Image: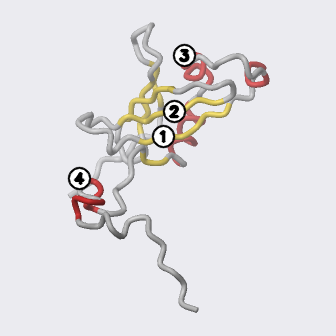
Amino acid sequence: MTRTPVTPAVSRSSPHPFDAMKVFDAPDGTRWKVEAALPGSSNAMVIFRHPNGDTARRDRYNWFISTGPEARSVTTRLSPRRVMEQMDDATIARLFARSMPVSRPAIEPNLAIGLGGAAAGLSRVIGRVKPRAS
């Protein structure tokens, strides 16, 4: 079985003029949609949307930190479109390399399905501190 060579990571601008989304080809061949959200005065969340689209479980995120003049004013907000314009292919690749999952697995499996606390019979011991032995 021969593997097809992976093309280098490349981002492409969306063909729609009003869409501030880009596409990022990861080294493993996955094509991620990239968008900016939650803009602040000096940063914005960059979301990498997995092509599966069925769930957000595979989506990833990282923070873009702006160094432009608008970042020095706490009364202004970055524009998601402007953030996307500022990010070149190398910046997107660097953000993706250090990105984190949007969702995380539940620590306690029962809490993920809503069976924690009283439903699991633990309401008497949750939040209680055991007294120290003297």
Question: Residue flagged by tag 4: what amino acid is it?
Answer: Ile
Q: Note whether 111 is above or below 14 in the view shown.
A: below
State the residue in front, 83 or 30. 83
Query: Mark 1 — residue?
Result: 61
Give me the C-alpha separation between circle 2 and circle 1. 6 Å
Q: Mark 1 or mark 3: which comes first in sequence?
A: 1
- Residue 81, by quadrant, is top right
Residue wearing tag 2: 46
Looking at numbered disc 2 in the image, what kind of residue is underneath it? Answer: Val
Image coordinates of residue 92 in percent, x first then y, are 54, 35
Cα separation, mark 4 vs mark 2, equals 29 Å
Residue beneath disc 3: 81
Residue 89 location, quadrant: top right
Residues tagged 2 and 1 counted as in contact (Cβ below 8 A): yes
Which quarter shows the N terminus?
bottom left
Q: Earlier in the sequence, mark 2 or mark 1?
A: 2
Which one is earlier in the sequence, the residue at label 4 or at label 2? 2
Query: Label 3 amino acid?
Result: Arg
Please name the residue that numbered disc 4 is placed on. 113
Residue 32 placement (x, y as % from top left): 38, 35
Instruction: Tell me the SS state at disc 4.
Output: loop
Residue 110 position within the rendered picture, expressed as x and y whole percent measured from the top left: 25, 60
121 or 85: nearer the eye? 121
Name the residue located 36 percent from the left edge and 70 percent from the top edge.
125
Q: Amino acid at mark 1?
A: Tyr
Instruction: Using the image as rendered, state which of residue 117 and residue 110 is in the foreground.
Output: 117
Q: Which mark is nearer the camera, 4 or 2?
A: 4
The residue drawn where x is 27% and y is 39% is: 55
**Rendered image: mark on residue 114:** none
